[in-house]
Amino acid sequence: MIQSLRGMNDILSEDYERFEYFIATASTIAKRYGFHYIETPLLEETALFKRSVGESSDIVGKEMYQFIDKGENDVCLRPEGTAGVVRAFIQHKLDKKGGIHRFYYHGPMFRYERPQKGRLREFHQFGIESFGVASVYEDALMIMMVSDILTALGIGYRLKLNSLGDQHCMPAYREKLVSFIDSCGDAICGDCERRKLTNPIRVLDCKNEHCQSLYLNAPKLIDHLCEGCQSDFETLKSILDQHAIAYEIDTNLVRGLDYYSKTAFEFVSDNIGSQSAIAGGGRYDRLIEFLDGKPTPAVGFALGIERLMELIVMPESVREGYYFGAMDETAIKPILLAAEKARRNQKAVVEYKPRKLQDHLKGADRINARYCAIIGENELNQNSIWVKDLVEKNEKLIPLNEFFA
């Protein structure tokens, strides 16, 4: 028997309801903030992610589904969403048009890593990208939007916050950090040795407990911010205070991608085990330029949908729509016509196989329909349809010409 690949799961049963509810809730909130939908291909040139995500990241170094296609192109399944949106932004010359461009997206991402709870090889993200706004107020807007989404879904969280500096303060800090890493000698792991050469700040994100103990006394970037970055960070904190969004400063929060600068944030949950991050993002003002676009400020975030699934508090189920059933073969055609009429403004599900009334009522319960509408021999003789309201618990016989009106 052929089965799904390891770490690539089907979404069915009650999970699809949670999944759809998440997408609908997050999309509605994004639209309220003035964002509109964008969709990019699942398959992109590998170079896009090497240049944007960065060679030092685990994603590029270990986890990409990369291959040579039949046209001898080096391609990969997208491991994250931001790079593809930036590529589309540049390709369609939106960077040249100027102005503000705000997008939201959702869809599958792919990373070849060890599957575990909340972390799959094919997983789904909901993401937001904002281009053209340099103000730290846009950073605050991102955090407020994530907070609104999680609150609407009934999910509790803790917010971690940090500043990664910019091209003015990062170089001097990087030198100090490399000197500190060198002082650790051979005690650091192989990943940290590699990151020291490619993107030293990433060592602070190392998951090796021994390395983490070594870095407790490492210089903190937040203590080496230039005046502009420090001012922005203080402003961000004051905005969050004003909106009663609690946060904690995490000086080791660097995010897993190389393109971040200034604001970095992560929302975590204490209810999903060790993989506690449920959303994260930050500012990436230089990524568009790195990908040969016109320098454009940008900020965004992404939420991992699978990690949120079991945390979502579903709204109370409400009966809605119609269940249509025939009690004999001759009733099937009028039942289809009745369903077609009802379906113009609400859900209408048809059971074609003739069944007893009790079986049809059970069928209406299974789909949580409000109305059970039946045509049998008696109804055909009277040119009518029997309808029971399963909420109000009343029933009536309606002439078909009135039902079709």
Image (cartoon, rainbow, N blue to C red):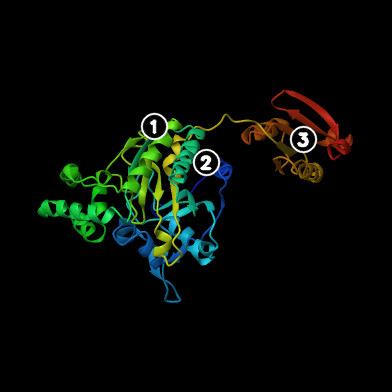
| Callout 1 crowding tier (Cα within 10 Å): few <14, some 14–19, many ≥20 | few
Q: Which of the two discs, 3 and 1, labels the residue nearer the N terminus?
A: 1
Q: Is residue 33 left or right of residue 163?
A: right
User: For residue 401, what is the image quadrant?
Assistant: top right
Q: What amino acid type should be assigned to the residue bearing mark 1?
A: Ala
CB under 8 Å between discs 3 and 1 = no
Q: How far apart are the two marked residues, 3 and 1, measured between alpha carbons? A: 55 Å
In this rendering, the answer to whether 174 lies above or below 68 is: above
Quadrant housing the N terminus? bottom left
Element carrying mark 2: helix
Instruction: Answer whether residue 4 is visible to the viewer in this image.
Output: no
Q: What amino acid type should be assigned to the residue bearing mark 2?
A: Phe
Q: Is residue 29 left or right of residue 252?
A: right
Q: Which of the two discs, 2 and 1, labels the residue nearer the N terminus?
A: 2
Q: Which mark is residue 374?
A: 3
Which one is in front in this view, the residue at disc 3 or the one at disc 1?
1
Quadrant housing the C terminus? top right
Location of mark 1 (residue): 246
In this rendering, the answer to whether 104 lies above or below 242 is: below
Percent across and percent down for residue 210 are: 16, 45
Q: What amino acid type should be assigned to the residue bearing mark 3?
A: Ile
CB under 8 Å between discs 2 and 1 = no
Element carrying mark 3: strand
Q: How far apart are the two marked residues, 2 and 1, measured between alpha carbons? A: 23 Å
Percent across and percent down for residue 356 are: 72, 34
Q: Is residue 352 left or right of residue 18?
A: right
Which one is in front in this view, the residue at disc 2 or the one at disc 3?
2
Location of mark 2 (residue): 22
Q: Which of the two discs, 2 and 3, labels the residue nearer the N terminus?
A: 2
